Image (cartoon, grey):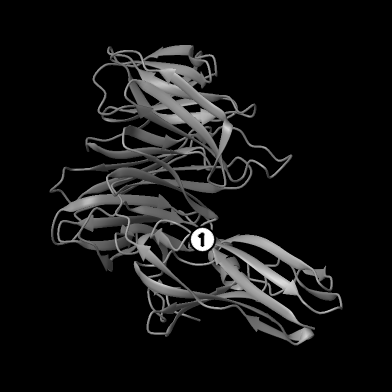
């Protein structure tokens, strides 16, 4: 058998927030048909080597590392075999964002390998140079929902060469070390606000919706929206409307089973309005009068049955509406005298998660998880956290075992992790805003940004004898 492997880079310069895109070509130059791992194979057969400019191997990854970084299941080295006829060729595209961490800024070379011992096959491509440049993050918006599979969508905003560039990523929250895709989606100078819409329905008929997301943004007095499939724009699926004078677009939207998109506005008097956004503009669906004197804008989440509105005033209050705006119920979730720091809706858990703290210089933090379709409310207060410097950023999550996990950045540029039974432990040193996130799954994952390497999650275990952070940085 005579096989030949080659690759072509989609582009030779990319940022720390993008996945490396390859086109692979495998030629069978001999006369006989061969049965080998094919384009859908996720075993160790297809591999990629990344070299530094001095020729040292910096990183190696293959289908097994992709499984290890995107799935909580045990990796399986099982080949998906196909027949490649004599004189025939295979061509397929690969997004390497799902295979490994994004690369830090620097100069590199890449080479593909193809190894299949049962056929005594061991070939490699030529090496090709490429460059990674830093993309500093100035804002992050993320949502968690469950249209088919539990998913975490993150939207990054970065100033590059005088433009605001936006990158869309999709993670499996059970194992968010690598992402399903990481694509540059919008480059516009006039975007004033941008966020992702939440899927408000669960569908199990097809997996087509699992990597599809709506993005909503504001330019001047216009509200715009575009659907993206794996980070690629669906040109015929968009919305465009005029924002009424004096109105504020809340950073929340949802799309239903019929793919209708809905946004929420606040009028100058503080009244909440729900509108459908389509190609013909904004169409009002309902109005809800919020109480005066709220501590912050309301948090809104939507499922197939209800619209959930949570607002803060000496605690949290939950209002449940149907999709026409009719009130179904109202209840106080909790009371506290601490000011609200952050509150967000988790569509996968159908819960609201909030952080209260005693001011920028204070060290007391109260965290709350409240189920919105059940009566459960879980809370924990971290009293007088012993850290040097002020707490500048905070994020948390609660695991299925009931443990609360807190992640913070101090004014001294230290990132610390603690849970309700111990800590703090030093995680890293980051001088700039890090956009912290916590996912408490089977393991604890801490997400944060560093301008020279982009945004990533690390797996953190303070009690591990092999090191608190499990690193996938080096070549393996």
Where 69 falls versus 53 (above or below)? Answer: above
Residue 163 location, x and y as percent?
31, 43
Which quadrant holds the N terminus? bottom right
Residue 365 location, x and y as percent?
25, 48
Residue at x 31%, y 27% (from the top left corner): 297
Residue 207 location, x and y as percent?
68, 45
Left or right: residue 68 compared with residue 30? left
Where 332 falls versus 401 (above or below)? Answer: above
Left or right: residue 418 compared with residue 276? left
Where 354 falls versus 301 (above or below)? Answer: below
Q: Nearer the viewer, residue 192 or 308?
A: 192
Residue at x 29%, y 59% (from the top left corner): 451
Q: Nearer the viewer, residue 462 or 72?
A: 72
The quarter holding residue 143 reads: top left
Marks counted in the figure total: 1
Mark 1 neighbour density, 10 Å: few (under 14) some (14–19) many (20 or more): many
Where 433 falls versus 386 (above or below)? Answer: above
**SS at mark 1?**
helix
Residue 290 location, x and y as percent?
34, 16
Q: Is residue 197 visible?
A: yes
Residue with the mark numbered 1? 97
The quarter holding residue 470 reads: bottom left
Q: Is residue 300 visible?
A: no
Residue at x 26%, y 30% (from the top left corner): 314
């Amino acid at each position: 058998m005579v096989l030949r492997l080659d690759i072509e880079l989609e582009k030779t310069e990319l940022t720390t927030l993008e996945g490396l895109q390859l086109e692979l070509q495998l030629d069978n130059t001999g006369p006989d048909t061969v049965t080998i791992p094919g384009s859908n194979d996720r075993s160790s057969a297809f591999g990629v080597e990344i070299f530094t400019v001095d020729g040292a191997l910096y990183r190696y990854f293959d289908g097994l590392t992709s499984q290890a970084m995107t799935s909580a299941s045990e990796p399986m080295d099982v080949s998906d075999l196909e027949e490649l006829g004599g004189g025939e060729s295979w061509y397929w595209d690969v997004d390497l964002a799902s295979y490994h961490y994004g690369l830090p800024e620097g100069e590199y070379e890449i080479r593909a390998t193809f190894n299949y011992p049962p056929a005594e096959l061991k070939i490699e491509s030529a090496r090709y140079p490429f460059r990674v440049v830093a993309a500093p993050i100035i804002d992050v918006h993320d949502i968690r929902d469950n249209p088919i599979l539990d998913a975490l969508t993150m939207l990054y905003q970065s100033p590059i060469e005088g433009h605001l560039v936006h990158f869309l990523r999709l993670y499996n929250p059970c194992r968010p070390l690598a992402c399903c895709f990481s694509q540059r989606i919008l480059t516009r100078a006039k975007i004033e606000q941008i966020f992702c819409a939440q899927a408000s329905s669960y569908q199990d008929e097809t997996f087509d919706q699992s990597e599809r997301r709506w993005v909503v943004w504001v330019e001047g007095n216009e509200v715009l929206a575009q659907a993206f499939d794996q980070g690629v724009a669906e040109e015929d699926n968009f919305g465009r409307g005029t924002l009424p004078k004096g109105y504020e677009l809340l950073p929340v939207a949802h799309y239903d089973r019929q793919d209708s998109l809905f946004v929420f506005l606040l009028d100058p008097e503080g009244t909440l309005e729900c509108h459908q956004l389509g190609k013909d503009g904004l169409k009002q669906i309902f109005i809800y009068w919020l109480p005066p004197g709220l501590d912050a804008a309301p948090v809104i989440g939507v499922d197939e049955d209800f619209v959930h509105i949570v607002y803060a005033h000496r605690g949290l209050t939950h209002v449940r509406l149907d999709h026409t705006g009719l009130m179904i119920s109202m209840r106080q979730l909790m009371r506290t005298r601490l000011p609200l720091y952050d509150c967000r809706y988790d569509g996968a858990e159908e819960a609201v998660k909030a952080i209260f703290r005693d001011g920028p210089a204070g060290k007391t933090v109260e965290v709350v998880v409240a189920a919105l379709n059940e009566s459960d409310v879980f809370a924990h207060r971290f009293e007088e956290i012993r850290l040097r410097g002020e707490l500048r950023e905070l994020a948390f999550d609660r695991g299925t075992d009931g443990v609360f996990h807190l992640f913070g950045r101090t004014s001294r540029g230290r990132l610390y992790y603690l849970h309700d039974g111990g800590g703090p432990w030093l995680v890293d040193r980051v001088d700039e805003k890090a956009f912290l996130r916590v996912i408490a799954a089977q393991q604890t994952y801490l997400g944060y940004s560093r301008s020279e390497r982009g945004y990533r999650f690390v797996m953190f275990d303070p009690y591990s004898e092999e090191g608190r952070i499990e690193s996938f940085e080096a070549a393996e």
